[in-house]
Amino acid sequence: MRIDSLQLFQFRNYKDITIKFNPEIIVLHGDNGVGKTNILESIYVGTIGKSHRTNDTADMLMFNADESGIVINFEKRETAQKVNLKLYRKGSKDIRLNDTKISQKELIGTLNTVIFCPEDLQLIKGNPSGRRRFLDMEISQTSATYYHQLLQYNRLLQQRNTLLKEYRGKQSIPLEEWDLQLADMAAFIVKKRLESLKKINLLIDLMNRKLTAGQENLTIGYEQNYGDENTIVYTRDEFYQLLQEALPQDRHRLTTSVGPHRDDLRFFSGAMDLKKYGSQGQQRTAVLSLKLSELEFIKSEVGEYPVLLLDDVLSELDELRRSNLLHFIHKRIQTFITTTDIHDFKYMDHVQFIKCKGGTINATNGKP
Ligand SMILES: Nc1ncnc2c1ncn2[C@@H]1O[C@H](COP(=O)(O)OP(=O)(O)OP(=O)(O)O)[C@@H](O)[C@H]1O
Ligand SMILES: [Mg+2]
């Protein structure tokens, strides 16, 4: 997978720019606040139809503009493709693949990218929702059906929660239909997550051993705080039964307490829970391994490596991990790197330097 060019129109601080990229490493450099991350963000929007740092589309439109455009020309399995997104301050997005209108759902999985940004370093320490989102998006990039089911599940879940509120204090509540469907989708989602996690676990351990010179082994466990303590619930019947058992409690709390929307991931180094006991460095290495395994996972599902977007993370890694990472991507993965300091890249081959200057850019090949 490789991005050939990017065109931005009234996107963040870019009025109208077109950039052609080289197939290997692209270093976006410049002072703080000049628009380096904005470029990665626009590419990410081309991947899943929304930003990694805001849920509000209007944030991405240039101040005072009513619309904004992103055009990405890329090659997937040697075939040239084009995604074209129009974002509006009012009204929904217009997404086109090779000039044919598609939905956001259909966009996902078209252009594959993996983004690694400073917030990801919180993946282990942070909230379960971040870990769920990570896993869900990783699977969605390789399975449109999964994303579709996930959206439907969330819609049903909201409707169920609304019903719980509407029937507050009443004697009975007509949830039968909802719960049957919800149980069905929950089973599908959890099965797919477990199946993917099995593959990711093989890959992540391999990556972590490379990064730590074989010293540490890393595994990810799947967790549910309902059902039996030592088993994972993944069948429709079990989910249906648990939903019924939890109903009195759910009616009291006005929310649904059973299902994949409550599940979590846990990282272990050997038998040690990294969230609780891992050092800062161990947690960082684990996240880096996770990101590298994501590249391999997408490759194994899609048939080629995705594009890698590294936002400001190199400076957060120590010398050894940084060089391991660069070694890993070298000549295999088109990688966009943002940085304020180009020192590390000055002597590397096949690097394209793009200087961001607050709305304009200056691209050079070979030398900064
Ligand atoms: N909607 C918008 N319209 C116009 N300009 C915007 C908009 N949103 C953000 N900006 C501008 O974009 C700039 C921030 O861009 P970005 O986050 O890409 O910076 P950066 O180069 O990555 O900086 P850092 O090195 O600090 O990470 C700010 O100057 C901000 O004013
Ligand atoms: Mg930035």
Image (cartoon, rainbow, N blue to C red):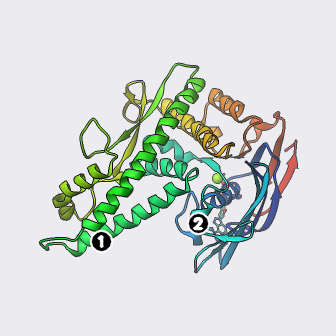
Q: Position of residue 68 (x, y in %)?
A: 69, 73
Q: Position of residue 231 (x, y in %)?
A: 29, 37
Which disc number belongs to residue 368?
none
Which residue is pictured at 35% across the width and 56% down the height? Answer: 184
Disc 2 vs disc 1: Cβ atoms closer than 8 Å?
no
Q: Residue furthest front?
A: 237
Q: Is residue 71 above or below residue 217?
A: below
Residue where numbered disc 2 is placed? 104
Which residue is pictured at 54% across the width and 68% down the height? Answer: 56
Q: Position of residue 353 (x, y in %)?
A: 81, 47
Q: Residues within 10 Å of mark 1 (few under 14, many from 20)?
A: some
Mark 2 belongs to which amino acid? Answer: Gln
- Name the side, left or right, on which 195 lies relative to 11: left
Label 2 vs label 1: CA separation? 26 Å
Res 19 quadrant in image:
bottom right
- Name the side, left or right, on which 110 lies relative to 351: left
Residue where numbered disc 1 is placed? 162
